[in-house]
Image (cartoon, helix red, strand yellow):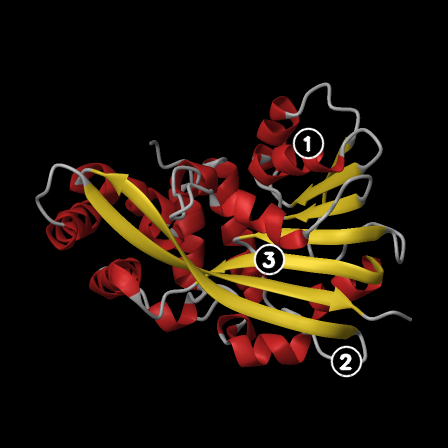
Amino acid sequence: MTNKLTESSIERLRSLKRPTPKDLESFLVEFHNSKPGITENTFGACRTGEGLSSYQVLVDLAGNLVGATVVDLACGNGALTHLLADQVGTGGKVIAIDMSKSELSLARERLAGRANVQFIEAAAADIPLSPRSAQAILCHLALMLFNPIAPVVAEITRVLQPNGVFAAIVTEFSTSTFGELRSLLLDSLKIDGWEPQYLALGDPQTKDPARLRALFAPPNFDSFDSNLFQVVLRGSASELSDLLIEFFYHTILLTEQTREKLRRKCESILGIESTVELPIFLRTIIARRSDE
């Protein structure tokens, strides 16, 4: 895949030394504009032991959504939006929100002709919807990228109706080969002169279940639950390495030489079997708005 993130953008990020959360947010938007659909390209093929995608796990987690107004926060190319549009039915509505023009363009193409879907280009910290206008807000593999997280939670709280549901899935890097491969990426960044600690994406609170629980606590939320689950990505070591090299945001900052070394290391870790099964741990989050 062509690296459409310009050299000038990469050099600008390098020159900042210690980029701010706003700088890193701009990097994320540029990344998704250059590689729309990248999340589904990787996770769309992952399945649980029951054969479910992480998108379907999230829809099931939210419960009965028939006839509801649902927000797909950071909708990407519309993979979750599509499932939600089917779930809410003609009596419901899905409002798909993203900051990336390219992702939204793909989502609009995908859902063309669906009268129960609306698309909005906006940030999660500034949702252009009325208070108490949604019965549910879902977020697939994006909550851990928001920084700071407090304004986002404030917007979720404002937009949800009493007894409304917030449901999300986030990555879990603390265990598994997936986390080991990510550690290799951090080492590769150092080789090319980057300081990974200043490139970390997302608010640290989103990486800790206890701190997440505190964000979705009374009096605004009545309940909170979070659980690990596993999906499996299957393919050859070469295929999986290519997918992950594209998926991890920071590989786009690496030189071709360092990226190729990282690719070979990934293949070595994944093994030599004709078909490799890579377990990936994800975390569900569900919180229910209080009955005001």
Lateral position of residue 42 relative to residue 140, left or right: left
Circles 3 and 1: CB atoms closer than 8 Å: no
Lateral position of residue 187 relative to residue 206, left or right: left
Instruction: Please state the horizontal and vertical placement of residue 145, each as a whole percent of the image.
Output: 53, 60
Circles 3 and 2: CB atoms closer than 8 Å: no
- Residue 259 is at least partly visible in this image: yes
How far apart marks 3 and 2 lie (CA) works out to 19 Å
* Residue type for callout 3: Ala
Q: Residue 73, relative to residue 109: is it above or below?
A: below
Instruction: Please state the horizontal and vertical placement of residue 150, each as a whole percent of the image.
Output: 68, 72
Q: Farthest residue to the left: give it.
A: 272
Circle 2 sits on which residue?
218
Tell me which label, 3 or 2, sits earlier in the chain: 3
Q: Farthest residue to the top: give it.
A: 113
Instruction: Please state the horizontal and vertical placement of residue 43, each as a whole percent of the image.
Output: 42, 43
Tell me which label, 3 or 1, sits earlier in the chain: 1
Q: Secondary structure at mark 3?
A: strand
Figure disc tally: 3
Residue 191, disc: none
Residue at left offset 54%, top offset 49% = 57
Circle 1 sits on which residue?
86
Q: Secondary structure at mark 1?
A: helix
Q: Which quadrant would the N terminus be assigned to in this image?
A: top left
* Residue type for callout 2: Pro
Q: Farthest residue to the front: give it.
A: 50
Circle 3 sits on which residue?
168
- Residue 30 is at least partly visible in this image: no
How far apart marks 3 and 1 lie (CA) works out to 19 Å
Q: Residue 161, relative to residue 18: is it above or below?
A: above
Residue sitting nearer the eye, 172 or 127:
172
* Residue type for callout 1: Asp
